Image (cartoon, grey):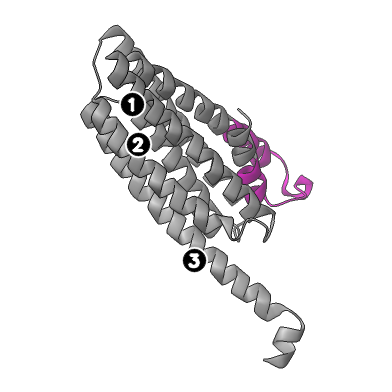
Amino acid sequence: MTNCCEDKSCEVNTLRESHSRVLWLVLGINAVMFLAEGTAGLLVHSTSLLADALDMLGDALVYGFTLFMLARSTRWHAGAALAKGGFMLLFGLGVLADAIYKVLHPVMPSARAMGIVGGLALAANLICFSLLYRHRSDNLNMSSTWLCSRNDLIANVGVLIAAGSSYILVSRWPDIIVGTIIAGVFLSSALGVVRQSVRVWQAPAARSPLPAGPAIIRVFKKKSRNP
């Protein structure tokens, strides 16, 4: 045990276990909120809730990707990321299609339900933010994950603004506009993941200086922070 602690392996193993527990927890929170917001968005006809659910799903997939795929081969990483990016593109296009449908076929969302669910999503992301905050300086991966969670709060606030504006103006347009913006930003991120994974998949393994998993995660989070 003394030798273990002297060469810092104890600290490293403890840190990895701590990161794993935190990532599992934020993965679960985001998965539950994806289901809750997605279901609520469909029931109350809210495009912004559906778009925020898309953001929750993206986070859950990123955390799952971090937990399960880093020990795999480069091409396995690329194939998994391509599948994830394709799924996200389909979901994002579905949100945009929902927005277009509501432009052509006016449906007034329930602003009160939007506010309640949006508030719960904000509380969930604040929990994730606080959990990740303690590990934001541990390494680059945890730092970027924390930044991603921090920026998710902006989308949550956007949903609340849409809910308040819809209530005050008695208009469906704030919900459509906010939902379209969130979905558009996320579609840009998903396209970046797809392009990166296709390049890695097509490139010979010998030409890949870094594992595909961390590279694709960095692209996804970078684009999420800089639409």
Residue 193: quadrant of the picture: top right
Say which element carries label 2.
helix
Q: Which mark is residue 163?
A: 1
Amino acid type, mark 2: Gly
Say which element carries label 3.
helix
Which quadrant, please, contains the N terminus? bottom right
Amino acid type, mark 1: Ala
Q: Is residue 189 above or below residue 60?
A: above
Residue 138, percent from left and from top? 67, 61
Q: CA distance from mark 3 to mark 1?
A: 34 Å
Residue range highlighted in magenta: 192-218
Categorize mark 3 by other alpha carbons within 10 Å: few (<14), some (14-19), many (20+). Answer: few
Q: Is residue 207 magenta?
A: yes
Amino acid type, mark 3: Arg
Q: CA distance from mark 1 to mark 2?
A: 8 Å
Q: Residue at x 41, y 42 (%)?
A: 122
Q: Which mark is residue 23?
A: none
Q: Is residue 174 above or below residue 148?
A: above
**Predominant secondary structure in magenta?**
helix
Say which element carries label 1.
helix
